[in-house]
Image: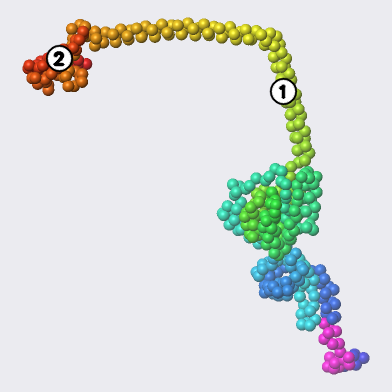
Amino acid sequence: MKERGKDRGQADRRAPPDDPPSVSEVTARVKDMIEGRFADVWVAGEVSNLTRASSGHVYLSLKDEGALLRGVIWRTTASSLAIEPADGMAVVCHGRIEVYAPRGTYQLTIDRLHALGTGTLEAQLRKLHAALAAEGLFAAERKRPIPAFPRRIALVTSPTGAAIADFLQTLLSRWKGSEVIVVPSRVQGAGAAEELAVALAAAARIAPAVDVIALVRGGGSLEDLWSFNEEVLVRAIAAAPIPVVAGVGHEIDVTLADLAADLRALTPTDAAVQVSPDGVQVAAAVAGLGLRLDAALTRRVATARERVTQLARSRIFADPARLVRDRRAVVDQHALRLARLGRAAVGRAGERLAAGAGRLEAASPVHLLARGWSLTWRDDDRGRGLASVAGVEPGMRLVTQLADGRLWSRVERSEFEPDLVRASRQDHAP
């Protein structure tokens, strides 16, 4: 029996079966066995040979010191990954092993991809933070104030996330006086940062212009929030011409987008609080102002009424003619004083006039002639008096005016006396 069985086993190894399975059948069995056992697998490794196809699919390899595993990220999955893979990146991937029968190969179809630990991302974050901070993108002096009563708000977020519901519900519960324009954008995955930057620029171009832009997203891991740490989005926030409020993640999550924004909100809900006034408080303040206004008007009316009462009791209303009499007495006093001052002024003017007339009378040429003085002029000079003997020659006819008449005479001779001239000048010297 043993010999016979041994002969049969040796014969099986030497001769093929009558109906051997085909390649497809063997591959199908392998596919069933592998895909059934590796439908939910996590794999850690280093990304290499990364290729992005024009279709949007991403092909790569995961390797370690001893092996290599091919992988693929389909286009629909690639757009939703938390981070974008790159050659040399240490990652941990989740997916399923699939056998590709036409080539007889197997690969990992990846549906989730994370950086292996947070050290790599944190190092990138610190490096980018230092570079942007050196440019002043996070400086407090470039922050702009948020309008207290915004009329129009642009909300940049995912239209399908929980953040938009939290923001709108909180805003409507606080203040219904603002119009919200939603600018949709992906908030996670490869290319999300670029899409958010484009959405910010679109929000700034809305007409009529919005008063503030709210950039919000729900919580998540560092990888989930990585789009808000990318340089393209941070620069778009800093360059926005309209104030930006960033409410990304939870209170403990701080992204570079939060630091670049004009105001950082702790959550999307807090962002709604930051961009809107509290309607209840505003109503209470208005009611308080109304009460103050009413009290102030009441006081003004009471003060005016009291003043009118005092005026009604005053003398002017009790005896109106008395004011006329008082004013008439004052006018009479002023008239008497004016008349007295007028008479005194006229008297002084008369005295000055008499004194001036006396001086004129004393200086009159007629009086001088009566005292023995005379006035002489050339007969042909029409009465111009002679002040000097210069120019007077013998034979010249002269006319002399005396107090009671005139004399005509002829010059026999003339004599110049300089001593008299000097004496006259001395007499008239000042």
Q: Secondary structure at mark 2?
A: strand
Residue 313 in the image: x percent, y percent? Answer: 71, 11
Image quadrant in which the C terminus is located: top left
Seen from the viewer's position, the closer of residues 257 and 362 is 362
Seen from the viewer's position, the closer of residues 380 and 96 is 380
In screen coordinates, is 399 left or right of 177?
A: left
* Residues at marks 1 and 2, CA–CA distance in whole angstroms: 102 Å
Look at label 1 and name its amino acid: Arg
- Residue drawn where x is 10% and y is 16% of the image: 410
- Residue drawn where x is 53% and y is 8% of the image: 335
Residue 265 in the image: x percent, y percent? Answer: 71, 48
In screen coordinates, is 20 left or right of 428?
A: right
Mark 1 crowd level (few <14, some 14–19, many ≥20, 10 Å Cα): few
Look at label 2 and name its amino acid: Trp
Residue for badge 2: 408
Earlier in the chain: of badge 1 and badge 2, it is 1
Residue for badge 1: 300
Q: Is residue 94 above or below residue 225?
A: below
Tell me which segment is drawn in magenta.
8-27
Residue 115 image label:
none
Residue 82 image-quadrant placement: bottom right
Seen from the viewer's position, the closer of residues 385 and 2 is 385
Assign the magenta stretch its main secondary structure: helix
Residue 20 falls within the magenta-colored stretch: yes
Q: Is residue 107 above or below residue 165?
A: below
Residue 216 in the image: x percent, y percent? Answer: 73, 53
